[in-house]
Image: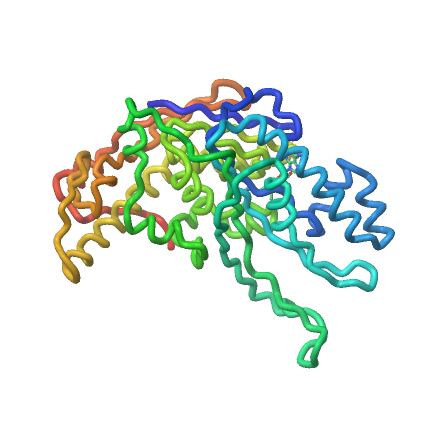
Amino acid sequence: MKTNHKLIFGNSNNMKEVISESVNLVVTSPPYPMIEMWDEQFSALNPEIKEAIQNGDGMKAYYLMHDELNKVWKEVDRVLAPGNIVCINIGDATRKIGKSFQLYANHSRITYFFETMGYQVLPVIIWRKETNKPNKFMGSGMLPSNAYVTLEHEYILIFRKGTNREFDSKNKLGRQNSAYFWEERNIWFSDIWKDLKGVSQKLNHEDLRERSAAYPFELAYRLINMYSVQGDTVLDPFSGTGTTMLAAMCSARNSIGYEIDPKFQKVVDFRLNEVLLFSKEIVLERIKRHIQFVEKYTKEKRDLEHRSTRYGFMVMTNQEKNIFFPIMEKIESINETEFEVTYDEIPEMAYIRAGSKQVQTNLVY
Ligand SMILES: C[S@@+](CC[C@H](N)C(=O)[O-])C[C@H]1O[C@@H](n2cnc3c(N)ncnc32)[C@H](O)[C@@H]1O
């Protein structure tokens, strides 16, 4: 099995390299309008934005920034195949411009734009990113009434282009291979994700999020496994440090990324060096957790009836029986911006098949 990954340095408001209706899933996080670290980039796209901020007209700047994002959402609409899903990670912004402090509700503006494009709006996920900064509370302190609630959550907006995706009835196994565990479903499909740190500290790098606004690997990995099948193509029009591409590689999906700022090439190269080992560990970690779950469940509740056809461990439902974890064996560069990944079985899987419950991983919690 092989997958292909392209990282294109350019503006995603014109994704001419991508064929219309060829993408199966979008997982992305744009620059957040009205968060100061993105002012310069938005102003480079439209100098009126800088002027509006300088003139104290926050609302004008906010609308103009969303106009820039909307150009990308229109391109996303062109390249996405009907029935497929768009996941957008976004935070709102609070900001004082001139004398006025207010919330800029980015999530609502993006939702509205997708409504106007005729998309079905699906339930959102909220995840917490608590801050311990000493100055996190703003406003009038312990005196009413001009103090402000601190924003410590982000949204994952989920939209579908039209009605449910249809799957080829002749290739049922392809979809079944891409199943996730029952107990993962219970967490992944909850509307509040309280802990995204767990599984994948390694690729997250301590200060990466601060410096580049990268989202956690686990966020992209979950969404890709929730909303696409192996062999699909995942697009990230705001690729940054390439988190979506890495998660797509680890999930045996193809990917395409666009990034306007060439400084990210180095970070992506650096992360690519680590992903091979990581791909193996993330799968072993999922299996280890599953085996622990089954042990606890059978001890406390009842025996399970279904068995994984490939790995031999028990699973909760018939839908999980054909679950399959391709593991990255090698990455080859086709050219400067394109990579091919080959997948293989790993020796550890033989131990699991033989009934060993001791799955070793080096993942940091
Ligand atoms: C919030 S960051 C994305 C971070 C990414 N999810 C990660 O994990 O590293 C947004 C990225 O979009 C890029 N960007 C902004 N406007 C763009 C555009 N029109 N086309 C392509 N990339 C753009 C920025 O340079 C930035 O790297």
- Kindly identify the residue that appears in the image at 68 percent across and 72 percent down: 147
Q: Quadrant of the C terminus?
A: bottom left
How is the structure coloured here? rainbow
Residue 20 lies, in percent from the top left, at 55, 22
Q: Quadrant of residue 279?
A: top left
Query: Would you place residue 34 above or below residue 319 in this image?
Result: below
Report the residue at 25% width, 49% height from top.
290
Q: Residue at x 74, y 45 (%)?
A: 63
Question: Between 117 and 153, which is closer to the camera in this rendering?
Answer: 117
Residue nearest the viewer, comparing 200 with 164? 164
Q: Is residue 204 visible?
A: no
User: Is 280 placed left or right of 138 in the picture?
Assistant: left
Q: Nearer the viewer, residue 184 or 110?
A: 110
In the picture, measured across the screen, residue 92 lies left or right of residue 304, that is right
Left or right side of 11 for 6: left
Residue 232, above or below 317: above
Q: Residue 7 occupies which quadrant of the picture?
A: top right
- Identify the image quadrant of the N terminus: top left
| In-image side of 311 versus 338 (left or right) | left
Q: In this picture, is 306 found above or below 344?
A: below
Residue at coordinates 28% horizontally, 33% vertically from top-left? 177
